[in-house]
Amino acid sequence: MPRSAWQRFRAQPGALASAAFLLALGALALAAPWLFAESPWAMVAAPLQPPLQSLHLPLGSDLLGRDPLVGLCYGARVSLSIGLLSTLATLTLGVLVGAIAGYAGGLLDSLLMRLADVFQVIPGLFLAVILVAILEPSIFSLVLAVSLAAWPPVARIVRNEVLGLRQREFVLAARTAGLGPLHILFVEILPNALPPVLSLVGLVMAAAILGESALSFLGLGDPESMSWGAMIDSARNLARQAWWLSLWPGLAILSTVLAVHRVGEGLRIAFNVRERVAP
């Protein structure tokens, strides 16, 4: 991050606190195997113990006697991994399609944008359910499903930026100097077209976390991984007598999504040139 952009980001206490929260959550998720001797599936206590009844089980226990705290930490590994991988895949696909469409123009531009229209009109959750059902639930299928549902807005933003930049003086100078189209697109144009895309980073990652939680709640998550959505799914029939079982993963999803969204907003403000020069 450029120094000036970092200074603008640091001047936003909410974004900075959210980034610190996400970093702490990521560190906790990475350290989960060392912090907890038992696996998230281990039955370590009597079932349905309320929270704050013992230091060993500060968040209580579930129907099978498992520790929700261990499940939350391992669930963070799944949610953050899918969020990061889905965001990376979405941005890569959207940026490539948008850059090629905007620079090439003509028939190729029309075909790529019609393809984006097709993916954009299909409800994201419906597309994700179909793909995960076909490919079998796994981290890969979840990342693929979320990415295919989220790339069209990124592609449209990059395309519009490239359309506005390809006739600028520095691009014409590069053509005059004999530089090839790939060099002009990826070295001269694309770095100047990326800042607006940062406004979507928080939205894409938040949508990925929510999408993974929704699929896991529907029983389409990775069966070999503990996730927050699966924890809520297993607790939905116990909402009256064991309210805490759905409360903890629900709070984890809510706080993480809000933090990701706030960091994304902070990045948008830090990098948005139009906003910085506005009176």
Image (cartoon, rainbow, N blue to C red):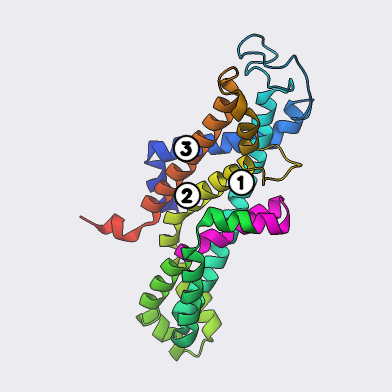
Magenta stretch: dominant secondary structure: helix
Q: Neighbour class for label 3 at 10 Å: few (<14), some, many (≥20)?
A: many
Q: Residue 151 location in percent, x, y?
A: 52, 63
| Residue 24 to residue 261: above or below | above
Q: Which residue is situated farthest in the left direction here?
A: 279
Q: Residue 250 location in percent, x, y?
A: 54, 31
Residue plotted at (58% across, 34% down)? 24
- Label pair 1/3, CB-CB below 8 angstroms: no
Asked if the magenta segment contains residue 166, the reply would be: no
Helix, strand or loop at label 1? It is helix
Task: Estimate the spatial distance between the alpha carbons at disc 2 and disc 3, rounded to whole Å.
Answer: 11 Å
Upstream in the sequence, badge 2 or badge 1? 2
Q: Which residue is situated farthest in the top direction here?
A: 53
Upstream in the sequence, badge 2 or badge 3? 3
Helix, strand or loop at label 3? It is helix
**What type is the residue that disc 3 sits on?**
Ser
Q: Depth-wise, is mark 2 or mark 3 nearer the camera? A: 2
Residue 54 in view (yes/no): yes
Task: Estimate the spatial distance between the alpha carbons at disc 2 and disc 1, rounded to whole Å.
Answer: 20 Å
Q: Neighbour class for label 2 at 10 Å: few (<14), some, many (≥20)?
A: many
What's drawn in magenta, residue-wise? 131-153
**What type is the residue that disc 2 sits on?**
Gly
- Label 3 belongs to which residue? 18
Q: Nearer the viewer, residue 41 or 100?
A: 41
**What type is the residue that disc 1 sits on?**
Leu
Q: Depth-wise, is mark 2 or mark 1 nearer the camera? A: 1
- Label 1 belongs to which residue? 215
Task: Estimate the spatial distance between the alpha carbons at disc 1 and disc 3, rounded to whole Å.
Answer: 25 Å
**Residue 272's image quarter?**
bottom left
- Label 2 belongs to which residue? 202
